[in-house]
Image: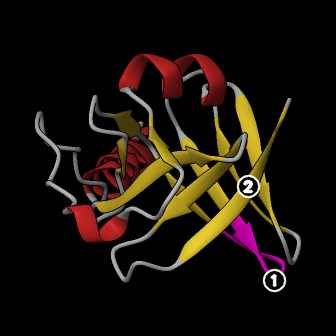
C-alpha cells in the first residue's frame, strides 16, 4: 500500500508539471507571414497532423499522438508534453510547463512552422 501511495504521489507531481493550453491563442502579426503563405485553421491542423509525425531537416521531428500527447525529437533527445491544441488562426500550443506557441502555414504546397522568433521550418507530414 505504501508503494502504491508513493507511486500515486510521484504521478501527481509529474502530471502537475505540465500546463494546459489556454482557450485562446496569442495573435501572430502579419510580420510572421511571407509571400505565398496560406492560412490554415484548427480543423485542417487536426485532420492533417493528429496521429502523425512532422519531419524537419536534420532528422528532427514532432509527433502529434492521437491520444492528445506530443513529442519533439532532435539530436537524439526527446521532449514530451501531455497535450497539444490547435487554434483557428493556425497557431498550435504545446502543453509544456511553459506552453509553447508556433504558427503553421502552407506555402507552395509545403507545411511551414513559424516560431515566435519568426524562423521558418519546412516540415513533411508522415504517418
State the image coordinates of residue 107 (x, y, percent, origin top left).
62, 49
Work out whether mark 1 precedes mark 2 in sequence or the reverse, and give the earlier one: 1
Residue where numbered disc 1 is placed: 75
- In this view, 96 is above or below 77: above
Q: Is residue 91 visible?
A: yes
State the image coordinates of residue 8 (x, y, percent, origin top left).
37, 42
State the image coordinates of residue 86 (x, y, percent, origin top left).
37, 33
Indicate the quadrant containing the C terminus: top left, top right, bottom left or bottom right: top right
Describe residue 121's horizontal placement relative to residue 6 as left or right: right
Query: The residue tagged with tag 1: helix, strand or loop?
Result: loop
Q: Is residue 98 visible?
A: no
State the image coordinates of residue 123 (x, y, percent, origin top left).
73, 55
Q: Which mark is residue 123?
A: 2
Residue drawn at point x = 86 percent, y = 78 percent? 58
Indicate the quadrant containing the N terminus: top left, top right, bottom left or bottom right: top left
Is the stretch drawn in magenta largely helix, strand or loop? strand
Magenta-drawn stretch contains 122: no
Query: The residue tagged with tag 2: helix, strand or loop?
Result: strand
Characterize the local packing of mark 1: few (<14), some (14-19) or many (20 or more) Cα atoms within 10 angstroms: few
Q: Which mark is residue 6?
A: none
The segment highlighted magenta reads 73-78
Please tell me in which quadrant of the rendered image residue 73 appears: bottom right
Amino acid at each position: 500500500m505504501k508503494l502504491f501511495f508513493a507511486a500515486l504521489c510521484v504521478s501527481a507531481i509529474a502530471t502537475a508539471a505540465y500546463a494546459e493550453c489556454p482557450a485562446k491563442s496569442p495573435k501572430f502579426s502579419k510580420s510572421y507571414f511571407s509571400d505565398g503563405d496560406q492560412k490554415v485553421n484548427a480543423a485542417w491542423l487536426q485532420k492533417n497532423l493528429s496521429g502523425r509525425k512532422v519531419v524537419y531537416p536534420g532528422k528532427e521531428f514532432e509527433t502529434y499522438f492521437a491520444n492528445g500527447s506530443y513529442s519533439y525529437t532532435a539530436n537524439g533527445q526527446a521532449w514530451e508534453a501531455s497535450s497539444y491544441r490547435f487554434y483557428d488562426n493556425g497557431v498550435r500550443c504545446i502543453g509544456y510547463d511553459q506552453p509553447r506557441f508556433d504558427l503553421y502555414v502552407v506555402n507552395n504546397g509545403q507545411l511551414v512552422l513559424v516560431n515566435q522568433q519568426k524562423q521558418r521550418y519546412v516540415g513533411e507530414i508522415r504517418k
